[in-house]
Image (tube, rainbow, N blue to C red):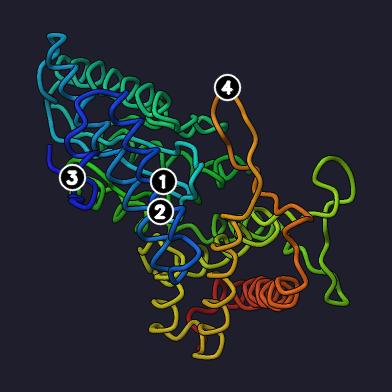
Amino acid sequence: MDSPKAEKRWPDIDCAGNLEQLKTAREKGQRRLEADFFSLPVEEAIAALNELHDALIVRVLALAENDLARSGLGAPPVPYAYMLYGSGGRLEQTMHSDQDSGLVYEDARDEAEEEVNRSYFLKLAETAVEYLIAIGYPPCEGNVIASNPVWCLPLTGWTKRIAGWFAEPSWENVRYLLIAADGRAIWGDAGLANQLRSRYFGDLLGHPVIERRMLDNTLHHKVLVGVFGQLLTERYGENAGGLDIKYGAYIPMVNAFRLLAMRAGIQETNTLRRIDALLGEGWLNPSEAEETREAFLLFLKLRHFTSTTMEGGRLVGTGKLPASKLTKEMVAPLKKALKVGKNIQRKVQKELPIRLGGGRAK
């Protein structure tokens, strides 16, 4: 199948015929990017890294399809789209991101065909996940992954699943709905993914209660800056003196702009594009857009300074910025950016309930 976004910048990846070659190509590509990462503008460096990840995942899916065909299962029986969620869906992955994925395929004509489709696509998803693990992408700890039958469904199955999440607004179901808002097709039939997103946003407009639950979930992670502007660093353990960049800076802004974009009917998944679109729709003024963009770019950059740990023979990012890297030169802009993040959380907390109750107030 054709990728919705074919990448040609990585010939070693495009030509890789097995997982060993693909793993080597990933390591070579990341070394190449690491050498130039901090000399490039942040947005350009992040875009290049995510193009690398996309190219690797696309090649894994092509290899998985080929291997299933060789094993006697043939080609995909109906069109499908392989989806990325989390930082992959937002095009914000780091060097050591994990897998957050799903799969949607075309509806069958009858039960017999559906069983064939279900069996094939679960096998394809399991194979792709296994191959991605082999080249260094650990599976999502929360099991949001295409090999999980909950995240591998035909279009009508997805529609029912999402309707069920809307109907039962538990904390976990609201979390799934927020995750689904970041879904992006990386391989296959982008039209299926677009249909799924259109139905999702259509359902969202009819569930104001869900939107209020989403607000609670969105504000769960607080920005790590105190009332006097001080950094709220880790107090104990091996990360003492460091700062949780992932959950204390980056994720709060991701969450805030996702919810604002959803409420505005903006279907972008990338946070910077969401900020630009919110400016265009009047949900942010030019000053807010400029300062939040600047702050978010700093958080994206600092995510690449965070420490890593070995898990299962793979390097995994901790999301924690070590105390040794909190230099004097870094502290002042970081404090400023965190204050911006805190202000945007306050904006969401103050303004969104008004808009939920009384429509668009610009």
Label located before the other in sequence (3 or 4): 3
Measured Cα–Cα span from mark 2 to mark 3 = 23 Å
Which amino acid, by three-letter code, is at mark 1? Gln
Per the image, the residue denoted by label 4 is 312
**To which quarter of the image does residue 70 belong?**
top left
Is residue 109 placed above or below 359 in the rendered structure?
above
Mark 3 touches mark 4? (CB < 8 Å): no
Measured Cα–Cα span from mark 1 to mark 4 = 20 Å
Q: Is residue 163 left or right of residue 193?
A: right
**Number of the front mark, 4 or 2:** 2
State the mark number for residue 33.
2
Q: Secondary structure at mark 1?
A: helix
Q: Which residue: 33% across, 48% down?
A: 52
State the mark number for residue 30.
1
Per the image, the residue denoted by label 3 is 3
Q: Nearer the viewer, residue 162 or 303?
A: 303
Whole-percent x and y of residue 37?
Answer: 46, 60
Is residue 158 placed above or below 343 in the rendered structure?
above
Whole-percent x and y of residue 222?
Answer: 73, 60
Q: Which residue: 61% across, 61% down?
A: 302
Q: Is residue 264 left or right of residue 299?
A: left
